[in-house]
Amino acid sequence: QVLLVQSGAEVKKPAASVKVSCKASEATLTDYYIHWVRQAPGQGLEWMGWINPNTDDTNYAQKFQGRVTMSRDTSISTAYMELSRLTSDDTAVYFCALSGAVAGFFQYFHHWGQGTLVIVSS
Amino acid sequence: DIQMTQSPSSLSASVGDRVTITCRASQSIRTYLNWYQQKPGKAPKFLIYAASILQSGVPSRFSGSGSGTDFTLTISSLQPEDFATYYCQQSYNSPTFGQGTKVEIK
């Protein structure tokens, strides 16, 4: 059973950056694509992008291009999501999630991290 | 981006009720449609993929149907643990989610 453990809550000032980690246990990250999904308070789910930990290929949602960087360290089964130039609109819970594909029948998020709350406030 | 629209946004139901949630895509997505359940303060839980295939361990009272642009999630007999928010998600291309349907206790 794959378990994803994310880093703890963060409080950041506007214009700062945040880097959230997602560590997989009982599995290697290279078996899956790693996605990041966020959820603003009281709102729905918003997909941010994915990374292929085998090739280091990434695909970011257009909304976040230029501001988000997804990376991984396969030696410690950990993925990272860094978001820069934060504004109050980035206040949200950020989830990592795994899928077996990036489109089609097997592009579903079968395992999720517990979420990391990022608060952006001056 | 493909827009996903769920209806209703919320509903009130009683234990034992049959509940149906609708999800509509802005273009045909064939059967590339997934469903999730989310409880407050928790990560979403994956329920159904390919519009109608239940993930292992998901109770059989959950079912999904549809193709093209119109999809439904049905709970045949609502149980206390089913009160939650449900999201559809298309996997035809870059993932997008519906806005969610909150199922509340009547």
Image (spheres, grey):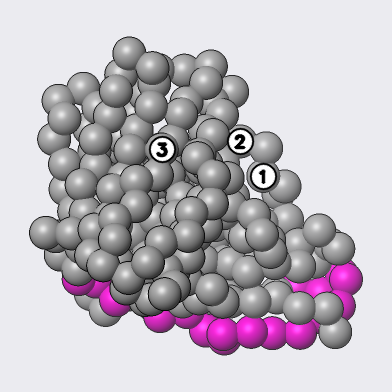
Q: Amino acid at mark 3?
A: Ser
Measured along the vertical axis of the image, is residue A99 above or below residue B15?
A: above
Distance CA(mark 2)–CA(mark 1): 6 Å
Relative horizontal placement of residue B75, taking residue B3 as reference (left or right): right
Gap in angstroms between the C-alphas marked 3 and 1: 29 Å
Q: A43 above or below A109?
A: below
Q: Which residues are magenta?
A: B1-18
Q: Are marks 3 and 1 in contact (CB under 8 Å)?
A: no
Contact? badges 2 and 1 (CB < 8 Å): yes
Chain hosting mark 1:
B
Q: Chain of mark 2?
A: B
Q: Nearer the viewer, mark 2 or mark 3?
A: 3
Give how far across and how far down residue A9 sits, in percent: 54, 51
Q: Position of residue A89 (x, y in %)?
A: 37, 76
Residue hosting label 1: B58
| Chain of the residue under label 3 | A
The residue that label 3 is drawn on is: A21
- At horizontal 72% and vertical 47% (from top left) the residue drawn is B59
Q: Which is more toward the observer, A9 or A109?
A: A9
Identify the disc placed on residue B56. 2
